[in-house]
Image (tube, rainbow, N blue to C red):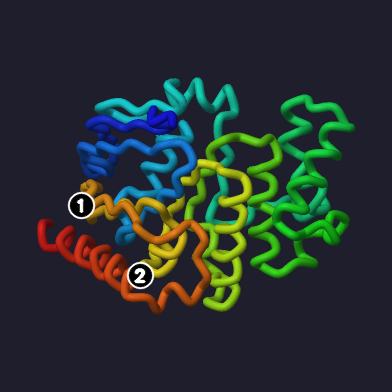
Amino acid sequence: MDTTPVIAASHLSLTFETADGPVSALTDINLDIKKGEFVSFIGPSGCGKTTFLRVMADLEKPTGGSITINNMSPGEARKKRAYGYVFQSASLYPWRTIGRNIRLPLEIMGYSKFEQTNRVNKVLELVDLSDFENKFPWQLSGGMQQRASIARALAFDADILLMDEPFGALDEIVRDHLNEQLLELWQRTKKTIGFVTHSIPEAVYLSTKIVVMSPRPGRITDIIDSPLPNKRPLEIRDSLEFIEIAHRVREGLRSGHRSE
């Protein structure tokens, strides 16, 4: 088994220069993510978890330390299309059908129309939206729009999927359903997933590894390797193991506040 990290951060830091002076968003981040792991980042607002994800995606530049994606810089990884990115909102173009929204990155990348059609059909089936290819975003529920956004990120078959709190605005029932579907999708595709969330149950349910972060300056207070099996019915949330992991996450969040 290859244990080389897919994502490796060493003493990573990022400081923003503002009119009121420097703001430290990330401080001394050390983390390895291996191929096929599902890693959640959890912490209070302003702890740097989204900033860390954006650094991986080359949307922000670190000011100290180093980070590699598939042994490349984030900039090289972006050019190689090593990852797909799912934002907090679905960010679908309202004038394009669901199929044509998913097709857009493939058009930009120069795939043939035949290959575009094949890939769109494949990912629509993966997210259970095959019957909605010709619908417009406004004709779909919020949860279905997010599934379409995930399909778009999967369309060019990158090995890494970065997700910035994609289910945060959805109600609990829809969120539970999408958590189940995302877990099944991860098991089927074997993608490496980085997932930002504010929800302790969501982080524990989805993840093979949970990274607990503190308030600004953002730093890691705990890294928890989950002992839960990969196949997880929702009922696992009532198990003693699940409750113990959730308790450890909660304690990590509290210790981060106490050390401010």
Q: In the shown orientation, is residue 140 left or right of residue 177?
A: right
Residue 256: give x, y in percent of width and height.
18, 58
Q: Amino acid at mark 2?
A: Phe
Asked whether the residues under the numbered discs 2 and 1 touch, taking CB atoms below 8 Å apart as contact, a structural biologist would say no
Q: Report how many numbered discs are placed on residues in the image.
A: 2
Of residues 186 and 151, which is closer to you in this image?
Answer: 186
Residue 55: give x, y in percent of width and height.
40, 36
Mark sitting earlier along the chain (2/1) = 1
Q: Distance between the Cα atoms at labels 2 and 1? A: 20 Å
Q: Callout 2: helix, strand or loop?
A: helix
Q: Which mark is nearer the camera, 2 or 1?
A: 2
Of residues 240 and 44, which is closer to you in this image?
Answer: 240
Which residue in the rendered view is the most extreme toward the front?
Answer: 1
Residue 62: give x, y in percent of width and height.
33, 30
Q: Residues within 10 Å of mark 1 (few under 14, many from 20)?
A: some
Quarter of the image for the N terminus: give it.
Answer: top left
Quarter of the image for the C terminus: give it.
Answer: bottom left
Quadrant for residue 129, please give it.
bottom right
Q: In the shown orientation, is residue 170 left or right of residue 119?
A: left
Q: Is residue 125 above or below residue 58?
A: below
According to the picture, the residue beneath numbered tag 1 turns out to be: 221
- At a point 36% along the width and 67% down the height, the residue shown is 200
Q: Amino acid at mark 1?
A: Thr
According to the picture, the residue beneath numbered tag 2 turns out to be: 242
- At a point 39% along the width and 63% down the height, the residue shown is 204
Asked if one can make out residue 80 in the rendered structure from this viewpoint, the answer is: yes
Q: Is residue 145 above or below residue 126?
A: below
Residue 135: give x, y in percent of width and height.
85, 60
Q: Callout 1: helix, strand or loop?
A: strand
Quadrant for residue 51, please give it.
top left
Q: Which mark is residue 198?
A: none
